[in-house]
Image: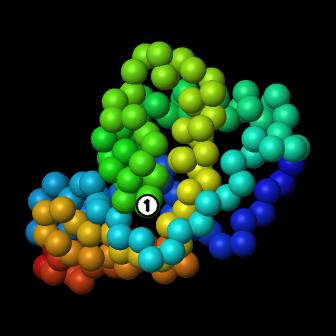
Amino acid sequence: HYLSHPVPTMRLLTHNTLRNNSAEADGKGFPLKITCTEIRVDNDGTGEGSTADDEAREVAFVKGILGILDWPTLVQGASQMGLKTLPPMLTEELAADPQFLRALYHVLMNVHLVRGMLTCPVTGREFPVTNGIVNFVLEEDECENVRY
């Protein structure tokens, strides 16, 4: 089935991969600190209309990306967005628990930063988020691989 979202926004899954790639950050601009002014949490899909196929797809999706998630960054980002329920460590038991994996899917895919700021931990550079889109535009002299 087709789901439509009113505004494209930044998910916590997206935040987990973002970094400041400016020359000044020197490859260390990760993780970006989230300062929220507006978030949106979509329905978690566990209510009416959720099928066994949906649940299996969500669990399979999360199992497939667990290996590439930076867990401490996810916990930090979720906390900065007001979600304090993620465990500090991902255990093998949790990684095999379908109920936990469905809840994690909800955190990764249904929690959106609509407006706020992402701040580089190294440089303090702020990247505004407006309508869920991060402005990462750098000035030419800020870029790592500037050729003159």
Residue occupying image coordinates x 59% and y 50%: 109
Which of the image's four quarters has the C terminus?
bottom left
- 147 vs 91: above or below: below
Q: In this view, does 42 lie above or below 94?
A: below
Kind of residue indicated by mark 1? Met
In which quadrant of the rendered view does residue 92 lie? top left
Is 93 in front, or is 69? Answer: 93
Q: Is residue 134 visible?
A: yes
Q: Mark 1 points at which residue?
A: 81
User: In screen coordinates, is 74 left or right of 72?
Assistant: right
139 in relation to 122, above or below: below
- What is the x, y in percent for residue 37? 45, 77
Going by the image, does 34 lie left or right of 148?
right
Q: Please state the total of marks drawn on the protein image.
A: 1
* Residue 81 x %, y %: 43, 60
**Residue at far bottom of view:** 139
Q: Position of residue 31 (x, y in %)?
A: 27, 54
Residue at 83% of width from left, 40% of height from top?
A: 50
Helix, strand or loop status at disc 1: loop
Identify which residue, 119 or 139, lies in the foreground.
Answer: 119
Residue 4 at what x, y percent from top left?
A: 77, 63
Regarding residue 145, the answer to whether it shows in the image is: no
Q: Observer-nearest residue: 49 or 125?
A: 49
**Which colour assignment does the render follow?**
rainbow
Q: How crowded is mark 1: few (under 14 residues within 10 Å), some or many (20 or more)?
A: many
Name the one closer to the observer, 108 or 29. 108
x 42%, y 71%: residue: 36
Residue at the image position 55 percent from the left and 38 percent from the top: 104
